[in-house]
Amino acid sequence: MERLAGIGVATILGTAGLCIAGAAEAQKPPLLPEKDVAALSNELSGETAKRNLEGIARFHRQRGSKGFREAAELVAERLRAYGLSDVAILQFPADGKIFYGTQRSRPAWEAEKGDLIEATLTSPADCGLHTNKKSNAPPSNTIDDTICIDLGDRKLASYEAEPVVLAEDSESADVTAELVDVGAGSAESDYTGKDVKGNLVLAGAQPGTVQDLAVGKFGAAGIISYAQNQPTAWSGENQDAIRWGHLETFSPNKTFAFMVSLKTAHRFQRRLAGGERIMLHAVVKAGQHPGNYEVVTATIPGSDSELKSEEIAFSCHLDHQRPGANDNASGCATILEVARAVQKLINEKELAPPARTIRFIFPPEIEGTMALLNGKPEFAKRIKTVIHMDMVGGGPETRTVFHVTRGPASLPSFVHDVAWTFADWLNTESYAFAASGKAAYPMIAPEGGKEPLRAEYSSYTMGSDHDVYQDSSFGIPAIYLNDWPDRFIHTNFDSAANIDPTKLKRAGFVGAASGYFLATMNDSNLPSVFRLLQLRALRVADEISQKRAQITNQCDGGELERFEEQNVRPLVESVVHLGLDSKGDRWPMLGKIGANIANNTEGVCLRTLSIVGGNAIFRRNPLPKGPLTVFGYDYFADHAKSAGVAMPRALDYQGLWGGGEEYAYEVLNFADGSRNTQQIRDAVSAEYGPIPLDLVVGYLQALEKIGLVAQLK
């Protein structure tokens, strides 16, 4: 067990007669000719990107809303002005009934008004009202027969001023009611001894987590939430921050919810604890309606007659609350800048036209991508690789770290190493400039900062459209460029003021250089690509060593080596994904690689094994396409409930490097009809930490019962 998989990879790749680049070459621009790197460096503008970002961030960009449409039209107008081809705003009906693969379409949601006002309690005599003794009913603005309210002008929240205060999927209401503190509000015990019927609940959990209990079970009139989602080290630090909130789109218990800051919530709690009665008046004009997912798209056409049908796509997500500057006006503004710069350089003959088509896609997050790939399957067939940008502009105040994120282990690909090579080179250049004031390619924006980039090459993390592309039903490798953590994420402080033009320029370069290289790549580039894979081999060896140290007490770590070696051939052959001729031998050099790859994957982590029903083989059914947890809808949970299937324990399992959602995503991806359950268990254990075999088998059996996989006989 001393031989590491990474060394095996390096040995195999070495059969092609390649060597790792020496230190003397480290400072030279990688992969692309230096003239192309210089052209991109000179043309990409952080200031232009930020101006477009400021335009996008003006709109409250909820799915199907007027604000989203206005942002989409702005993007489309810019793409046309930049000279791109095939500019369109595609529409996909969304009414809550139509499915796009595993995504149940969510009806459009629009809001016009949302005001939360604190009412003043007075006696009927003081406000000139008298109870109606004959009817034994209080006047319309009284809360009982002795107290009336004066609405006054103490406005606590205004949708017009800050749209983030109104939770997404709120419904219209005009309610005056008493406020009741229910703690988190996510458990029945939170309501013990509290009269919430007809009242407003003050809750610490997300409105969607609260609504079925507070409104559905206990009869609350609405929700006031101070939920602190997206926890980071800075959570709660800014007591004035208001976080984005969501209600459940498909809950039968329709209601409204306002989001308030911690400062406001704590003030309410102190007053309520002192015995004070708090009356709030909520006026909401909002609701769901049948509408459309809208996806902006445009292309830079490929120039090769054979390869132009293949596409390298740039993706972001255009939707978010206002301002939503880093999340995710930054990603959309940056790929818009890539489109402008690359098209201009081609027009001016500074760059050669790409062989493959370069496509730009601006959808609502996840659900828009699901609609596109399922509603127009020809897109999924043409796209060979995606560069996805979700939060790429965070300046120093955001405390963020820029990541080049690899794909899941179920989809090995060299494209991530392409992106990392450019980012790592830019790390070196930007650090040299910050430390000495001298560098050939510092890539700083005149209005931006001068800090080093310090990008990190990270293992796969979930949470954006890259999950859709890399799901096994589509199998499209995605380079994921993203900032994390970000102390302003999902708050009213995620503003353009915290966006750094230098960061936008650098993220744009990593994306543009990666996309352009992949769009122009041919047989002559293979030696450089294989050098990248050699470097990956060394990196994998180091990562395996670190992982083994963490699991020594649980098993021998052998499955890590076996799994990485099993993935050597798919990693090398991922190069073929960018194009084969009719004979399947566009790049003959590939045939010389990987003849003696180890393929022993029978597992040995005996302390976590329990064989259940033998080592069955499952294969994912071709439909429906997409991951099971999408946006605002859980396909597995919904269908399991209908079929009477208990929730598998794997969904709650916490491993060393991942949890239930990650295990579930990859178990389904690995169910390809060739791996047995033991091999799938070994694969996900290598990726996220040892998991008992019976949990993997139980999840696959549950998937079979709802028709997502079939057991091969």
Image (cartoon, rainbow, N blue to C red):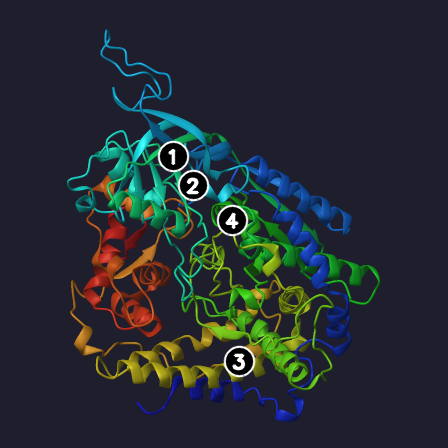
* Residue at numbered disc 3: 533
Q: Is disc 2 surrounded by few (<14), some (14 to 19) or many (20+) residues within 10 Å? A: many
Give the alpha-carbon distance from disc 3 to disc 4, as whole Å. Answer: 30 Å
Mark 4: amino acid: Thr
Q: Residue at x 78, y 75 (%)?
A: 35
As drawn, the label of residue 653 is none
Front in this rendered view, residue 379 or 37: 37
Is residue 173 visible in the rendered image? The answer is no
Q: Closer to the camera: disc 4 or disc 2?
A: 2
Could you tell me the amino acid type at mark 2?
Answer: Ala
User: Circle 1 is placed at which residue position?
Assistant: 256
Q: Secondary structure at mark 3?
A: helix
C-alpha span from label 1 to label 2: 7 Å
Report if residue 656 is visible in the image: yes
Q: Amino acid at mark 1?
A: Phe
Q: Is residue 195 left or right of residue 45?
A: left
Q: Nearer the viewer, mark 3 or mark 4?
A: 4
Q: Residue at left 25%, top 63%?
A: 653
**Alpha carbon separation for disc pair 4 and 2:** 23 Å
Dots 1, 2 in contact, CB < 8 A: yes
Q: Marks 1/3: CA distance?
A: 52 Å
* Residue holding disc 4: 369
Q: Which image quarter is the N terminus in?
A: bottom left
C-beta proximity under 8 Å, tags 1 and 3: no
Residue 64 x %, y %: 53, 37
Q: Residue furthest top?
A: 134
